Amino acid sequence: MPSSPAAESLPPPAAPLAARLRRLDALASPVRGPLRAAGACTVAAGWLLIAQAGLIAWAVQRVLVERADPAVALPALAALAAVGALRAGLAFAARRSADAATTALRDGLRRRLARRLFAAGAPWLRRQRSGALSELAGAHVDALDGYFGGYRLARAETLLVPPAMLLAAGWVDPIVGAVLLLTLPLIPLFMMLVGWSAEAASRRQLRALARMGGHFADRLRGLGLIRVYGRGEAELAGVSEAAEGLRERSLKVLRIAFLSSTVLEFFASVSVAVIALYLGLSYLGMIELRAAPPTLGAGLFLLLLAPEVYAPLRRLAAHYHDRAAALAALEEIDGALDAGDAGRREPAQPAGRGRTAPSVRIVEVSLRHAGAARDAVAGCSLDVAAGETVALAGASGCGKSTLLEAVAGWLPPRAGRIEIAPAGARIGYAPQRPFLFHGSIADNLRLARPDADDAAVRAAAEAAQVMRFAARLPAGLDTVVGERGFGLSGGEARRIALARVFLREPALLLLDEPTAFLDPETERRVLEALAAFARGRTVLIATHSAAALAIASRVVALPAAPVPGTAA
């Protein structure tokens, strides 16, 4: 269970901010329509605030100052209620559209991320921490939600609503308009300065989250081993330490977010106070900056409007750290995708192709597992003719399993080459420790061919002798097994892996100890089915079983392992 995080191996940021923002906005192209609709509703609701303030000011001026009949204000009050209801409806529509858009965007990005990671190939995937990769599709994708569902709407509102309010205020009183015009540009300037620190802090926080997620996922997978070796307390301390590091980084992000909000509130409060002071002194006759002081209705309109000029900026500040988090998350996702593309292999052949029995040529191949000091296989050469069944024999640790992994494409050679002709031949691989997913036995078999019908699944299970134990289970092939085959014996898990290979109908079979842990009768039946299935196919079997060696047309004995005790 390695502790070095995959996230720290990703490339450092290189693209300028403008390019990364364009890349981030390009992700929204599939949902641009709903996002634009949400933005339009948000902006329209902001513009209606001007009408609300005007209606309130007009009613106060007519009734309280001009002593008009209160009935005169009834139409204005009705219009005010209608505008309030319309604003509430627009806000609801904006939120609904934005939520639908961000949900679709997250789902699409996760599908794309999964396709790219699957296409990266087994060698690259096996070098990654599965916990860190799951964080990419989890927390990192979720980090984009606040940007598209919050920041972009607030940005559109900030660009279009305050200028309209500024024009309305300037038309009523040019001095108030000048105060607003002078103070508004200062807020984005200071927010930009704070934003540089926010993005760096968000990047560190996301990497810490990926590191902790990978660490915790690895420990969960190895929980049984941790208990056996009495390392529970030590691992709990490690998880606690990782959580503390994440807490500290999260608080740093929050401190920066609070700082940006403080800067905004300071300038907004000073501006509103200056406007209120100007109006109050004008009404008291202590200053005369205009020929006549504004009316009470005009002053009320300006006082109602002044805080609302800064409200979109407040919302933008509240979501500003979402922008920084989204940029950091996109950088991590792109880094993983670029690293995966570097190890990308040719896509698997679709159904109906790649069934011609291939030949396999292994030329002076040396293989070494990641982190190992010595080669597990050194200078191995082997030619397997098309349609031939070759058994790999030798003592444990001589590299039989490692060689099969290399032919399957799981382990790239350190030296030499492996040629499979024709290229693109369909490969079926049943490793010594097959991975079974949590789900039914039938679901695990259909991993090889999702479109297989029940008859094909049952035929593959019969051939691999899966039905010998599945028939005794409560739900037969629909019986649910735990992850990694929990609830099954080693021999039963191997038979499911072999049935999965049968269902795939490959041209090249790679089988690692397919009959281990089987009783003689079951082994005989499995080998009979395997011999029948192997006709017209190329087969490589790694085995210690004399019965399995007997069905091979040729037996190749691998030399002893270069280093005693090295796992094959």
Image (tube, rainbow, N blue to C red):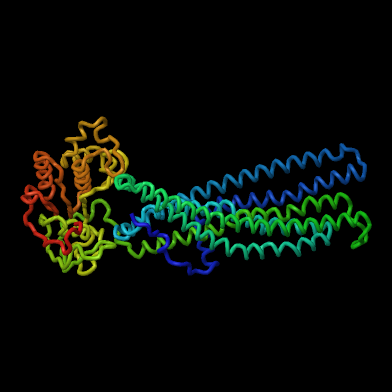
Q: Is residue 463 above or below residue 273?
A: above
List x then y, in percent, for residue 476.
24, 33
Quadrant into which the C terminus falls: bottom left
The residue lying at 56 percent from left, 54 percent from top is 251
Percent x, y of residue 335 = 43, 63
Above or below, comparing residue 95 to residue 209 in the picture: above
Q: How many marks?
A: 0
Is residue 174 rendered to the left or right of residue 142?
right
Quarter holding the N terminus? Answer: bottom left
Q: Is residue 391 above or below residue 224?
A: below
Please state if 14 lies on the left or on the right of 251 as rendered.
Answer: left
- Residue 322 x/y as whole percent: 56, 55
Image location (x, y in percent) of residue 338 = 40, 64
Q: Is residue 340 above or below residue 435?
A: below
Q: Nearer the viewer, residue 328 or 152?
A: 328
Q: Please give the name of the residue rendered at 66% of the width and 65% of the height, measured from the top-left corner.
A: 189
Q: Is residue 448 left or right of residue 361?
A: right
Q: Give 301 or 404, whichever is nearer the viewer.
A: 404
Q: At x 37% / y 55%, what residue is drawn?
A: 115
